[in-house]
Image (tube, rainbow, N blue to C red):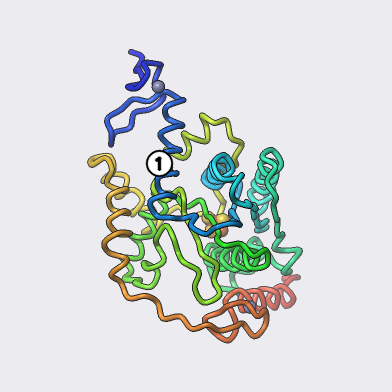
Amino acid sequence: MVKRCSLCGASAVTWIPESKQYLCAEHYLEYFERRVLKTIEKFRLLKNVKKLLIAVSGGKDSTVLLYVMHKFFSREINLVGFTIDLGIGKYSRESTEIAIRNYKKLGIEYIVVNLKRSYGFDIDDSVRFRKWIKRPPCSICGIVKRYLMNKVALEINADAIATGHNLDDLALFMMSALQGGKVEELTKLTLYNPSINGFVAKIKPLGLVSDKETLLYALISGLEFYEEECPYAPQRGLRTTIIKALDVAENNHPGFKRYFVLNMIRRVIPKLPKPQGRIMRCAICNMPASNNVCSFCKIRARINEVIQKYRNK
Ligand code: Q46
Ligand code: ZN
Ligand code: ZN
């Protein structure tokens, strides 16, 4: 039997277990946008933001973020897209091309940094020379993304950086941080991280919509996004177990992830001690750092050194 939209009777595309509603395509788009706009309003994510850097990988989350921000805020906020070509073979080539096509389609100003061209190494190098670098690609990739996002945001005087992290990402990060007792990491897992010690403020407008909801929004809206996963994404281990456990909890108790994340953001994280960062400047690049030399410059120097030494091995 064809299910009907609980609001208008048209044929339904989805069921929202939390509100026990079937929704048609049109009402689903409205529902999703309302959720994102409510998050932005409730958590005052765009307060005093006149220029916003939007980090776009070309995947579904950041593409939806770009599209929604453009649809609702392009008249009042100067939006600038930002993409890093990380040098992960076909994954980076194609996702970067898609990001650029979307910027052009929407008429959004954008910046693309090619890691290899600008800094002499890329993520594939870190894998090729892993034996000597001894660090997983995702850890290097995380340092690169955080550093370049902040650097570019400072250079263009952006008031904040928006990232496409969704509810599932936040629930996973929170569970992992809790499990590992990483209190300092937990304090950063909010929807709004204020500007502190030379780091530009960060916002997560999709932080209360799930992975599935974001995918459905992208599909119904006909957005072009890169569908394949990064080849270095971990396939096993604790991370995967936590994802599965969270999915079981969500299936048995619809809304579990949303309540968990909201309770963490509202009740738990504000009670944690604030990180006591000092303002330091990296001796090499002069960017804000927690040590004499920032993590990016350290890893850049190490990988370039290894490339020089072992390139023919
Ligand atoms: S891009 Fe980078 Fe992810 Fe690929 S290397 Fe890991 S962190 S998995 S979001
Ligand atoms: Zn409807
Ligand atoms: Zn540095």
Q: Is residue 239 left or right of residue 253?
A: right
| Residue at the outermost left position | 253
Instruction: Establish if 210 lies above or below 300.
Output: above
Q: Is residue 142 left or right of residue 119?
A: left
Q: How many marks?
A: 1
Q: Is residue 93 left or right of residue 226?
A: right
Instruction: Establish if 67 lies above or below 151.
Output: above
Residue at 33%, 59% in the rendered image: 265
**Residue 228 at x, y = what percent?**
56, 43
Q: Quadrant of ligand 3?
A: bottom right
Quarter in which the C terminus is drawn: bottom right
Residue at 62%, 51% in the rendered image: 79
**Residue 217 at x, y = what percent?**
48, 35
What amino acid is found at the position of numbered circle 1 in the picture? Arg
Residue 274 appears in which quarter of the rendering?
Answer: bottom left
In the picture of the structure, the residue carrying the numbered disc 1 is: 35
Q: Nearer the viewer, residue 6 or 237?
A: 6
Residue at 31%, 53% in the rendered image: 262
Residue at 49%, 55% in the rendered image: 46
